[in-house]
Image: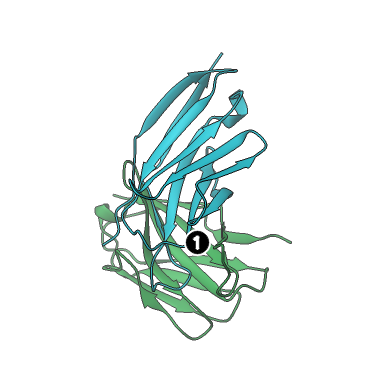
Amino acid sequence: GEDVEQSLFLSVREGDSSVINCTYTDSSSTYLYWYKQEPGAGLQLLTYIFSNMDMKQDQRLTVLLNKKDKHLSLRIADTQTGDSAIYFCAEGITGGGNKLTFGTGTQLKVEL
Amino acid sequence: NAGVTQTPKFQVLKTGQSMTLQCAQDMNHNSMYWYRQDPGMGLRLIYYSASEGTTDKGEVPNGYNVSRLNKREFSLRLESAAPSQTSVYFCASSFPMGQPETQYFGPGTRLLVL
């Protein structure tokens, strides 16, 4: 089955950039996604990238996709304390309709 | 719009007890999902319903049953709870066959099985 992997923790100082990495296995995924989970809440879609793109920028967020290495990253510029959360990457399941496979999640801690 | 709502927010069960987790959405979505979230394992799909009247197993369906009561509601039942089912359960819904796939999540139900 599909396997999406992320490192579990990342700690950065406020104002620095954060880079969260993800590796995925299904090379035929059409879209790849980043979701954010704030403490005690459900997940919210942050951004996504179409598989024929290699970069997408959305305000402070930059998504980079390396299809050859099946590597996805999320860069948050000027990280703020409000960015502290768990970040999940996800890929669509080929032939699985609307189903997604989520990664293990990376807990981002922003320190003053 | 309330989005996706879940009840209860928190529940403690004894091993062998049964319970039903409720989920409702008011966004007229066709597809609904149940996930469990465990530390270090991300979200794993338990069951999903692509449309009213249909349900299918996900990655970890054992020990659970679901009912798609109508387009709005999708419930998850634990017939005989086990400590391994201690987890946070999330319900989600999505646009019909929408791409990119935007799943909207409820706030979660925290379940402790003793």
Which residue reaches farthest bottom? B53
* Image spot of residue B61 (x, y percent): 30, 68
Instruction: Left or right? Give the position of A22 relative to A83.
Output: left
Q: Is residue B112 visible?
A: no
Chain under callout 1: B
Q: Is residue B72 visible?
A: yes
Rendered position, B91 above or below A78? below
Instruction: Left or right? Give the position of A60 relative to B93.
Output: right
Rendered position, A102 above or below B79? above
- Give the class, few, some or many, for how many residues have Cα within 10 Å of label 1's Cα (few <14, many ≥20): many
Instruction: Left or right? Give the position of A12 relative to B56.
Output: right
At 29% from the left and 64% from the top, the residue drawn is B60
Instruction: Check disc 1 and report its element: helix, strand or loop.
Output: strand
Which residue reaches farthest right? B1
Instruction: Left or right? Give the position of A30 relative to A8.
Output: right
Shown colour of chain A: cyan
* Image spot of residue B86 (x, y percent): 33, 51
At 45% from the left and 73% from the top, the residue drawn is A97
At 55% from the left and 19% from the top, the residue drawn is A16
The residue wearing badge 1 is: B91
Shown colour of chain B: green
Amino acid type, label 1: Cys
Residue A57 in which image quadrant: top right
